[in-house]
Every structure is written in C-alpha cells, then in structure tokens.
Amino acid sequence: MVRVHEKVKEFVRHRWVVFVCAMWDMSFAGTSYMFGSISPVIKSSMGFNQKQVAFLSVAKDLGDNVGLLAGKFSQLYPISTLILIGVFQNVLGYGLVWLVVTHRLPALPLWLLCILIFVGQNGSTYYNTAALVSSVQSFPESRGHVVGILKGFVGLSGAIWTQIIAMMNLPDQASLIFIIAVGPAMVSLALIFIIKPVHTYQQSRASDESGFMFIYSICLLLAAYMTGVLLLENMLHLDQTIISMFALILIILILLPITVPILLVFFSGPQSADQEALLEPPLLQATKSKNVIGESSSTARVTKHVENEKSIPPNLEVLPLSEGPRDMFQIQARLWQALTNALRKIKLKNGPRRGEDFTLSQAMAQADFWVMFFSLVMGAGSGLTIINNMGQICQSLGDNNVNVYVSVISISNFLGRVGGGYFSEVIVRNFGYPRLIALAVIQAMMSLGLFYYVVGLVGQVYVVGILNGFGYGAHWSIALAAASELFGVKNFGTLYNFLTMASPAGSLFLSGFVASTIYDYYAEQQSKHRMMQTFEASNLAISYHVIANNSEVLLCEGNICFSLTCGILALVCLFAASLSLVIAHRTRRFYAQLYEESRRGPNYASHLAEKKTLPRAGAEKRRERSKLRRRARLVLPEEDDRREKGADRSYHVDRIDDQSEARMQKKRRIVR
C-alpha cells in the first residue's frame, strides 16, 4: 500500500503529467477560432453591420495576441496565479457579452463590447503562457517538441470545440457564447494544481524520445480523424447519435497521451544513478553548463577582475598546513563566492551572451531579436492574410465550399505546428544546423504555394490553403523554440508574448492595406466595366455614382482578384526567408557547439572527459606538488597550470643544453 501511494505521488509530480495536462488545457484554450461562429448572433442581436462586426474581430485578435502582461506576471507570480487571472478575465469578458446578447443586460455601445471581447479573449494568453512556460522549463532539452505540440493543439481547439458543441446540440447560437465563457475556465481550474514547472532533470530518460514519437502518432491520427469527420459532415446528413459517437471518439483520442506517464511511472523498473548518467541527453548537459559558449575566454577575465577588485579577503592569502579540512572547505566556499560575485558584475556590465537568460529589454537591444521579429511579421503575417481572406478567395472563384477549405486550413495549421517542431529538432540535433534554417525552408515553401495561385493551376485553393496553413502554424513552433535557446527560458513568457504580436502586426498591414486595396480596385474596375456594358455612355457617370454610393460591398470575380496579392505575399515570404537565413548565419557557431555532443553520439562526452584527464608522462609528481601548494598558499588553478607549463619548458631546455654540451666535449676528444 505504501508502494502504491509513493507511485501515485511520483505520478502527480512527474513532468510528463505536467506536459500532458498542458496539452489538454491547450486543446480547449483556442477560443479565438470560434469567433466566426458567434459573430452572426452578435450581429443580429445587436443590429450591427459588417463594419462594426469587423471592429469586434480586431478587438478579438488584439486580445488573443497582446499578452505582455501575462508574460510579466509569469516572472513574478506562480503558474496557478496566471491560470486564475485567465479564468477571471475569460468568464468576465465573454460572460458579460452573453448577458448582453441574450438581453439579460441592457444593450451596450460598440466600444464597450470591444473592450469586453478583448478582456475575455485576453484570458487565453494566460492559459498559453502557463502551459508553455511550465512545459519548456520542465523539458529544456526538448523545446522544439514541446512548443510544437502545444501550439498545435491550440490550433486544433476550434475543431475540437465544434465537435463537442455538435454533440451537446445547443438550443441557440447564443448558448455558444456561454460555452466559450465557462468551458476553457473549467478545464483550466481542473488542472491548476498540476500545471507547474518540474525542475527534476534526473527524470530525463532515453524513453522521452519514444514518448514524443507516440504523441506525434496521436497528433497524426487526430488530424486524419478530424479530416474524415469534417468531410462526412459536409457530404452526408448525419443524425445526432453518430455525431455524439464521433465526439466521444475524439475525446478518447485527446486523453490517450496520459498513457506515456502511466507507463513511465507504474510499469518501468528503477534505474541506477550510473544508468541515469548514461541516459542523460547531451543537450541537458549543455543546459547545465549554459555558459559553454565563450566560457573559456571569460575565465581569464574573471580571474583578472578578482585580482583587480581584491575580492578575496586577506585571510585567504595564507593557509597553514595545520588547518583542518573543515576550515579548508569554508575557505574554498568563500573563494568561489568571490568568483561568482565577480562574474555577476561582469555580466551586469557586458550583458548576457547567447543562450543565457535575457530580459525583454536586454533582448530588444539585440539585433537577432529584431531580425527574428520582422521575419515573423512578414512570414506569419502573409499566412494569416490568406487565412483571413479565404472566404473572399473562394467567393471570387465561384466556389461555395468555404467550410471545407477553412477546415483544411485548420488541420494544416495543426500539422504545421506539430511538424515544424519535429522538423526543427531533426535539423539541430542530427546536423547541428541553426533552428531558423527550418523556418527559412517553411517560408520558401509558403512562397511556392502563393506562386502556384498566381499561375492559376488546377486546385490552386487547396494548394495555397494547405501550404500557407502549414507554414503559418510552423512559424510558432520553430521561432518560439529558437527564442528560448537564444534568449533563455527564465523570461520565456515575456519573450513569447512579445513575439506573438508579430502576427497581427503583419496581418494589419498586408491584409488591411495591401490585400483589401487591391481587391477593392479590381472590384471597382469590374463594376465599372459591367455598367459600361449595361448603360449608355451618356448615363455612365450618373449610374456609376449612384451604384458606388448605394452598394455597401463591391464584389470581385476571377483569379485576378487575389493573384497580385499572392504575388506580393510570395515576395514578402522570400524576404522573410532571407532574414531567417541571416539569423542562422549569425548563430551557426552557437548551435554547432550547443548540439556538438548530440551529433557525435552519447559516448562522446565520456571520451572527451577521459582524453582531458589522461596524465602526461612524468607529470604525476608535479601535480601532487601543485595540490600541496594550493592547500598551502591557495594558488588559483590557472596560475598553477601556467607554472606547470613553464616548469615543463625549463626542464626540456635544460635537457637540450646538457645534450649539446656532451656532444661538444665528444667532438673535442675526437679532434685531440
């Protein structure tokens, strides 16, 4: 009984349980994808026009992406506090919207409804920050896998909610707003005591890779299952029993990842400390020594700083041999404390290096951070522009299967987030290339899909939808994992929420100015051309003026409506890929050293340690004497190494001089 209790306690505190619960939380936190389902009931109940609904959509996008406050709170408060704040905002914002739409509260002006939707949707940023920060800090050696899977489930949450709501068979669309207000909050509250960072690095096992492969398999199965269900629902008329059965199967698939921690805790045998050391991932070893890049070059600076600042107390200069080991340990502790203080002063003066923990202000002073941000603005902004205009693209081509294409984009977005994380992990671990090379490849792939639409070949909507949905999703798994590697995981919540603002910023310019301007231009030209064919030339100006003033929306037909826009977006994606390659070139040495041991195999670290500890011939006695000198006079290791090298050189010089003198004497005897 005691053994079972210990296993249950270990299971609850296991980092795989934290990750699986974070996946469940993300599966229901992406409520922004449900706005298209609730906007019609808001429009009809409040009497809004399409432009006013567009303002509500902008408020929703801002609330979903502006999460700097959540990132800042992740540094100051525990994860449970973040979840509580998110629950409060979610229930408050969407709860009041539901009361207004159902006329339980008096009607509110448009600006106040925008604020309520912003507050309600902004609660999801606290859910996302809590899940990502907890998982990344619990799996520092598998950041690409963790970020990709979590962001993938966020993208799939819209389709998950659609199936669950279809099973519930709600009486009206207004009830959907109530579900959005309380559904994610209930899931997050149920997991509030489990989602938190677990800093137990000894739990790293070789089975982690098989665990991630199992979850990737579930993700592919989920994508295939959702695709089949959506196609069946669009092609056939299904009764409520079959719809409920589909939803139950979906919930079972979402719960399947919990088998990974169950197998690891209850069905895996105990391992010794030696086995844990052998199974420790190379990246984790690099994480433990975060200053591996440039560490050797900074040692001399630290020693010099200690000598100049006289950080060592006077009583440390001489230590009699009669002192006991207890005093010796105290002296060593003081010495290392002085060295640590000196290193901290140098870091405060020069700033952190790549791979160390940056604050947001320190990261914003780095060129790598801004190059990455603008690469996201262009790449993710292009993908979001296509996603937001998919309805008008289908309408311009005369295709009425908008729901099918939107579902295809949603599933492609999910696969991109999951597959992008896996693809980038393969690049950095197997080849040692920078992670941003994967992002450059994804952005080039998006450019090819956009050029395919420009040419106007068969299946252009499917191609541009799949490639851009996949590429848009891959941006977040690759870029966020790279940000945690380059700028550290301590302030990852703040960095993550700042980088996510790149998507609405890019969409605001590319969709709000470029795509809409080009679409309206061709729509006006086609409207003018139709009037020229209908009316006589004498009535053209008057008729055009009347129609232009009376028509609210100008419709464009044909491939020309978005072909120029897609061409511009393709060039923008190519420029974004070039920016990603710039970062990859700047960080190539960092990634080469960070993942060097991973590429050379698990035995490389032990081989390197043995090679460094091989004693030189005839140097054992000198090493023993150096240890005695360190105890007597507390000589720094670097100074003692220099003395040893100098002694070796003087020994060889004296030996050469003796040999040359012997040869000269032999020559003199021969001459005589």
Image (spheres, grey):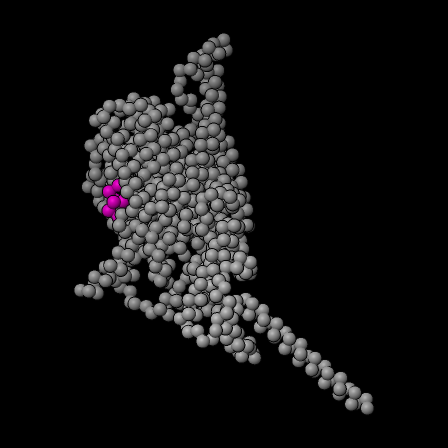
Q: Is residue 383 visible?
A: no
The span picked out in magenta is 185-191
Q: Quadrant of the image for the N terminus?
A: bottom left
Name above or below for residue 631 compared with residue 173.
below
Find the residue positioned furthest to the top: 538
Which of 422/659 is in front? Answer: 659
Residue at image location 19% in from the left, 65% down from the top:
2
Q: Residue 469: percent from the left, percent from the top?
A: 41, 41
Question: Which residue is at a point 49% across and 48% down the rendered structure image?
Answer: 436
Would you say residue 342 is visible in this rendering? yes
Instruction: In this rendered view, identify the residue nearer to me: 261 or 190.
Output: 190
With 86 as the anchor, is 551 left or right in this view?
right
Q: Residue at image x 73%, y 84%?
A: 663
Q: Main secondary structure of the magenta part?
A: helix
Residue 132 place in picture, x, y as percent: 36, 48
Q: Is residue 468 above or below residue 38?
A: below
Q: At 44% from the left edge and 54% from the top edge, which residue is drawn?
A: 425
Q: Vertically, is 532 above or below 265?
A: above
Query: In the drawing, does residue 470 fall left or right of residue 571?
Result: left
Identify the image quadrant of the C terminus: bottom right
Across and down, in percent, residue 255 comes to 26, 51
Point out the residue furthest to the front here: 314
Judged from this view, the residue extending furthest toward the right is 672
- Up the image or down, 538 lies above or below 217; here it is above
Q: Is residue 170 magenta?
A: no
What is the total number of numbered labels drawn onto the structure image? 0
Q: Is residue 187 found inside the magenta-colored segment of the image?
A: yes
- The x, y position of residue 53, in whole percent, is 34, 26
